[in-house]
Image (cartoon, rainbow, N blue to C red):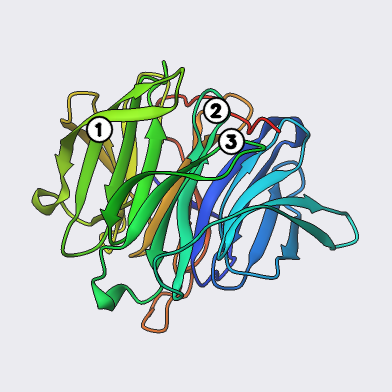
Amino acid sequence: MTAELIVDARNAVGECPVWVPEENALYWVDIPNGGLQRWSAGNGHVAAWKAPQMLACIARTNAGNWVAGMETGFFQLTAHNDGSLDTTPLASVKHPRPDMRLNDGRCDRQGRFWAGSMVLNMSANAAQGILYRYASGSAPHAQLDGFITLNGLAFSPDGRTMYASDSHPLVQQIWAFDYDIETGTPSNRRVFVDMNHFLGRPDGAAVDAEGCYWICANDAGLVHRFTPDGRLDRSLSVPVKKPTMCAFGGSRLDTLFVTSIRDDQSDQSIAGGVFALNPGVTGLPEPTFTL
């Protein structure tokens, strides 16, 4: 399968693609630049907004704007056609140390937002990342800790299994959890996939309509699909070394969109771009955050 470059975005760290069906558009972020971007599928137009902090993860809200995980906590974002971006603080996070930010995040199927934190310097090998659950009107609740670079958050179609990964080279694990959909509590943590046995480091993820887990294999230029019992089903190639996160979109949710990194060592002209693949399966509508 050939991956199509749909936006030569040249993002430093492109992440968190989210398909918005009512706009026929894909949104995503460029973390260190605080960038929120949108690609309109109908005409290929790209719009961009800039947040006042690093912008790590987003989810659509039931009000039609965005909840975002940034450096200091959770914010509400409202993007305007004139290029302005309203940024409203919702809840702050008390990091264990000052050089941290939120990273990967997404909503569960009940409309609660999840995001993990990380130390900015990955080479510090600091396992001080915390996974937070945030519901509107409440303080962020720390659920799990001990991560270096938390990624790979996703939920099974019935919402009763939660997935998370740690993409740091010293870890490279994907875990599954039983998930209580009433309380939003994960339990029974177990290794789902040991990515040390496969190409690439586990980065951002998505779950398809068949319950299979798709994860970007950073450093390997691949997106892997694992069955619910943890077996590798297929691997799709993208023409850059560092894919970061994938999301299903398009009118039939049968396109897999993939963001990527363009770092200082990149020798690929299209690194940091956004790509589209035909994965041969369909995805699920992305849940919205309940304000």
Specify few, some or many for label 2: CA neighbours under 10 Å numbering under 14, 14-19, or 20 or more: some
Q: Position of residue 151 (x, y in %)?
A: 36, 51
User: Which kind of residue does numbered mark 1 sit on?
Assistant: Ala
In this rendering, would 34 be left or right of 166?
right
User: Which kind of residue does numbered mark 3 sit on?
Assistant: Ala
Q: Nearer the viewer, mark 1 or mark 3?
A: 3
Disc 3: which residue: 135
Closer-to-camera residue (164/243): 164
269 lies above or below 163 = below
Whether residue 223 is visible: no
Specify few, some or many for label 1: CA neighbours under 10 Å numbering under 14, 14-19, or 20 or more: many
| Inter-mark Cα distance, 1 to 3 | 22 Å
85 lies above or below 123 = above
Mark positioned earlier in the residue sequence (1 or 3): 3
| Inter-mark Cα distance, 2 to 1 | 24 Å
Disc 1: which residue: 176
Per the rendering, the mark at residue 253 is 2
